[in-house]
Amino acid sequence: MRSVVFLGLLVAGGCTGDTPQRCNCGNGNKPNTEDSGGVDSDSGTDSEAPPEPEVSINELMADNETAYSPDGANWPDWIELYNAGPGAVELAGWSIIDGAEEPEPYVLPAGLTIAEGGFLLLFADATTDGGAHLPFSLRSTGEELLLFNPEGRRVDWVDFGDQLQDISAARAVDGSDKDGWIYVPGGSPGRSNQ
Ligand SMILES: [Ca+2]
Ligand SMILES: [Ca+2]
Ligand SMILES: [Ca+2]
């Protein structure tokens, strides 16, 4: 099978790290356990900031025909977020966008919370239902997906290629780049990729 998913190789404005899906853009200066090399010791005041939970785009399915239905009637494209912690995350004010197709990122409303070590599904069904329903869908021929925190810092970024019907693209290790991405027939929506 051809390689389908790859993390973004481009480097967005302000990001110079070699792990763009985790890069601390803008004023992001949180301690990051994945960082190495002492690049976080910029201003000397960071030690006062509590560590932010690590939320990532953990899995996606861009061509969902029969794999998963949240209501027994619809089979939307879906995106799974994972919170590695520490702590739970309330996603009000976070935003998500599929590359440059949409004029504005979709801002997640109050009421969507991910527990530490938990998962949350977003439905890319191109509806205006709100909540976990996104006003865009995922192209099965591939596109980008970007996740921002309420401060506008990009916290994750996936650039995926052609996707096959009812097969998800999933991080081999939840929330981690370790071992890259795998294809999962049927996917594992709302639960661990392992
Ligand atoms: Ca789709
Ligand atoms: Ca799209
Ligand atoms: Ca999963």
Image (cartoon, helix red, strand yellow):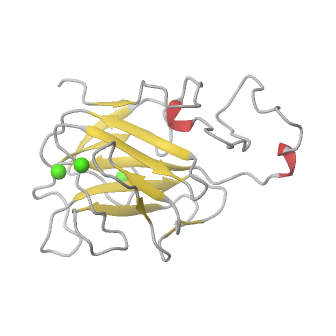
Q: Is residue 97 visible to us here? A: yes
Q: Horizontal placement of 31 versus 83: left or right?
A: right
Q: Horizontal placement of 46 versus 60: left or right?
A: right
- Residue 185 picture location, percent across and down: 20, 45
- Residue 60 picture location, percent across and down: 30, 48
**In this rendering, is residue 40 above or below 137?**
above
Foreground pick, 175 / 96: 96
Q: Is residue 194 visible to us here? A: no
- Residue 103 picture location, percent across and down: 33, 52
Residue at 67%, 43% in the rendered image: 28
Residue at 14%, 69% in the rendered image: 74
Residue at 64%, 40% in the rendered image: 26
Foreground pick, 126 / 21: 126
Q: For residue 183, which quarter of the picture?
A: top left
* Quadrant of the rendering where the N terminus is positioned: top left
- Residue 67 picture location, percent across and down: 16, 57
